[in-house]
Image (cartoon, rainbow, N blue to C red):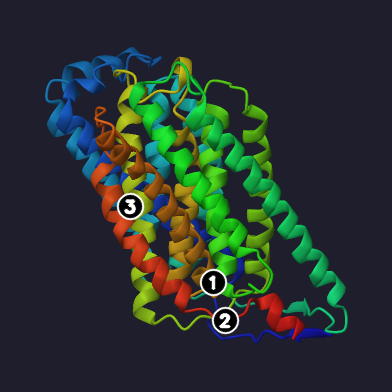
Amino acid sequence: MTTTLQSRTIPGTVPRASARASGLRRFVGGFYLVMGGINAGIVAADPETYRTFADGSFWPFVADTWRSVVMAHPTAWILALAAGEVALGILLLRGGPAAKVGWVGVIAFHVLLMAFGFGFWLWSVPALLLLVPVARADWPALSGPATATSPPATPPVTRTRPNPSAPAVRTSSTITTRVATWVLATAVVGASLYGLLAETPYRSLPEATVVSARAQDACSIAVAALLILLVRPGVHSTAAHLARLGLLAYLLYSYLIYVTGVPMNRVFLLYVLIVSLSGAGLLGGLRGLLDDPPSTTASPRLIRTTGWVLVVTAVLFAGLWLSTLVPYALGGSPPEPEGVGGTPYPVFVLDLAVVLPAIAAVGVLLLRRRPEGGPLAAVALLKILTLFTALWAGPVLALATDADVHLGPDAVPSLLLLAASAWLTSVWLRSFSPVTPHERSTS
């Protein structure tokens, strides 16, 4: 049958376009806060990093002024610039008339940045094409005092419930999921055994990376076994469904790294198959969660705590990677680690382009008390838990085999996050109803 949920017009509700502009304003404000911190960290570590910043300017007086004035006292000037970025971020986040000053400052900053050379136009022009329309859309809502933006009114939603008298669809879906999981698990076990038993499965990689890859192979076999257990007949709980999606997210992330960051070996096609099946299963499951999010008994405190944990985690690791990449972009030494043959390290690409923005978005959904935030948080936390378990299996294996132990800059944050995500995952999985939304709709 079809159920139509009618929305009500709430006085004072912010229009959808204005709410979208407000969300983008907060994103830009957060971005400027992060960039202010990064610039402060770079100049504190090495003020000479900015020595050549204005060398590409097409106006001689800009380059001369930069060298003779700014680089005469680089620490003070760059820290002042960082403070200005932080101030602009705070103004945008505050909202109200203060945000108007923030928008003007951000747009002026990008216009002035173009004076430092055509290379900066590659960033400033696209940024201005985004910032100017967003500022214009957000401007009318900033006339009053700074207030929290009300969520947009929910439009009418039509949901079609499955017909209880048609169990064949559900059975077909279950069989398809089970078969795909068995194929996926077989591919994971095959690829992992090759990594564990072959003589040179990860040639040209540093010894520490090979140890970590083999430890991750052992963890992947355990993940394959868990996936089989989660799709066996009779298992239809929400927790099992979310756990399966979290494990699929782990496999997709891990084997995207294998596909792009490991020299091609004899099981490359298995890597491709794993990426395809885990990606398809994850996307299909996430779509179901967004269409009909399962109910949860999570307390407001748990929701708020988890939201901030995810947001802070995303910002923390983005800062770690950017502290390595930004100095290189400004003329410093190449980042460590690098990919094979000097290609970008796959973790940098996946984290900064996909994973960290997604984790931050889930955290924001929780803080805004959106119903889909809870199940998505459980999936994200389980992915974090399995990934960092696999990462820490490498040092454990190195200790057991008397090999050298190499810990990266993310060692301490990842260990703390491992403990936090283990606790939060267990609490969240217990907070969901015992049956999946699909089971509820067909019962």
Amino acid on which disc 1 is placed: Ala
Secondary element at tag 2: loop
Residue 188 vs 13, above or below: the answer is: above
Instruction: Indicate which disc residue 26 carries.
Output: none
**Mark 3 closeness class: few <14, some 14–19, many ≥20 residues within 10 Å:** many
- Nearest to the eye among marks 1 and 3: give it: 1
Amino acid on which disc 3 is placed: Gly
Instruction: Indicate which disc residue 239 carries.
Output: 1
Q: Position of residue 317 (x, y in %)?
A: 34, 45
Left or right of 71 in this view: 170: right
Q: Earlier in the sequence, mark 2 or mark 1?
A: 1
Q: What residue do we see at 24% from left, 30% from top? A: 402
Q: Which residue is mark 3?
A: 89
Q: Earlier in the sequence, mark 3 or mark 2?
A: 3
Q: Quadrant of residue 165?
A: bottom right
- Mark count: 3
Q: Quadrant of residue 177?
A: bottom right
Q: What residue do we see at 45% from left, 70% from top? A: 366
